[in-house]
Image (cartoon, rainbow, N blue to C red):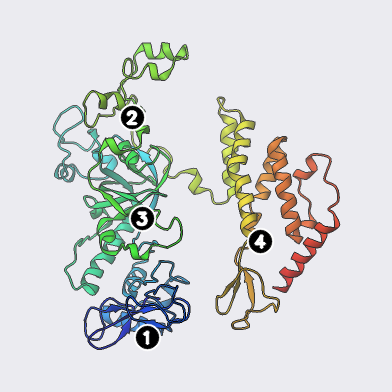
Amino acid sequence: MALRRCPSCGLETPSYFCRRCGSRTEELYFCPRCGRRLAPGSSCPEHPREGPVPYSEVIVDLSLELGGASERLGVSVDPAKLRGVKGLTNRDKRPEPLEKGLLRAKWGLFVFKDGTIRFDATNAALTHFTPREAGVSVERLRERGYGRHVNGEPLGRDDQLLPLKVQDILIPREAAEYLFRVSKFVDELLVRFYGMEPYYNLSSPEDIVGHLVLTISPHTFVVNVARVVGITDADVIFAHPYLHAAKRRNVDGDEDSIVLALDCLLNFSRSYLPSTPGGREDSPLIMVTRLDLDYVDDECYNMEVVSKYPLEFFEAASEEADPSSLAGSLVPTVGTELESGVRFPVISFTTETSSIVAGPLESTYRRLKSMMQKLESHVALVEKIRAVDPEDAIRRAMDHHFLRDIAGNLRKFGSQEFRCLSCNAKYRRPPLSGVCPRCGGRLTLTVHPGTAVKYLEPTRRILTKYELRGYALQRVRLLEEEAFSTFASLSRARSTTLELEEGPPEPPDSAQRERDVFRDLTVFL
């Protein structure tokens, strides 16, 4: 890991400040090949082509380090609650201060790869709400800028309908409870680690209302600032369609994350991000403080803004008219309103509801645990929808998800490394000695065989039940033959999908030899 030295007392430490005298430490540089210590800007005499790096292999007395961190904080944490990583994946191997890990463990929190704490939840679109639905008093909403009913009347009752501001969100109760613990962690971090005053001082999860969070979507590197204005029992994050579009998400149903603003500002660091391709994804490299509809996913431009549809719309729909010909003329949309100069078009609704949380409080996908349960529920829903061809929908699910996952898992299993259980060394191929060359420890697989074939059984059952033929069946047969030639345990029970047709010929001797070799290797390891 990264190693630094105090210019005053000479203490070598991974910390930016010397824990002995408080001075700012300086980076040390090493040869990445032989570990020789180098002067800044110099190169190794034995390996001149290798540039110096700020890290080296060091021995860490973890018990001593944890004890020191615990003493400096004045906090005692059960070591069983601590979680760490097997190795640092950032370019310069810079570790986070142990004090932060101790305080997170105290509050039962988990850290993301960039140093932030996140709460994941499914998106849901919302344009209007009542104080009662948000679980917030009328007085508190007035303080946050909600002064009038949707029709212009002054806000005075908890059943009056309010237009949701575009950067306000309603969060699940579970999220409020989690962010409440994050606020306690941040306050304690400010006091015990940074020597500052606490910031949040919350007394209950409900006090998270009014505070800022950062919203971020998978595979992006931009966070949008949002404000919590309510808490609901639904297991979703309610936000305006414009905010979802700013996150480059579809308006409904995608999974996103929220981060307490000060946690991100204090604890995020580019230095922690993995150096591997894609390591910067899902990280707050850019912060958007004000939403601009010129820089959002243009999918929201197609949303209609009307409170009712004219008769001509239904007549045109019955004649299967081109939808683009109706936008603006019959049904105004966000896009047509923007073109007319409206900065934030108000999205209305056509049907009222008694409560925004009157439906299911948690998505079925999250409630079901196994992939087989999810697939069976998907198929059951498809069979109930008259507008969907069940066979076509199932074939699409097979082709775009399960078959690709099976092929990818088999490929990953075949290209995996072998790991030593004692020293954690990894090898591209198992050594001929059968043990770790470094320490003589026992070797094990890094990809479990069950992972490679976990989707085969659900795929078999669906294909058998619906008697699907053609391309999907042929791909499954090829993948099963690959799995059969790889895993000796599958030889005891041939695939049921293979029996849908005449049945395959007996495997050639070469395939049999490959199975025997793999079986012997598995037993050997």
Disc 1 versus disc 3: distance between alpha carbons? 32 Å
The amino acid sitting under disc 4 is Pro
Q: Which mark is residue 283?
A: 3
Q: Is residue 8 above or below residue 364?
A: below
Q: CA distance from mark 4 to mark 2?
A: 47 Å
- Counting residues from the start of the chain, the first of labels 4 and 3 encountered is 3
Name the residue beneath numbered marker 4.
449
* Amino acid type, mark 2: Tyr
Could one spot residue 286 in this view of the protein?
yes
Cβ atoms under marks 1 and 3 closer than 8 Å: no
- Judge depth for marks 4 and 3 and give the one in front: 3
Q: Nearer the viewer, residue 298 or 488?
A: 298
- Judging by the rendered image, the residue that carries numbered circle 2 is 301
The mark that comes first in sequence, 1 or 3, is 1
Q: Nearer the viewer, residue 472 or 208?
A: 472
Residue corresponding to mark 1: 64
**Residue 22, relative to residue 304: is it above or below?**
below
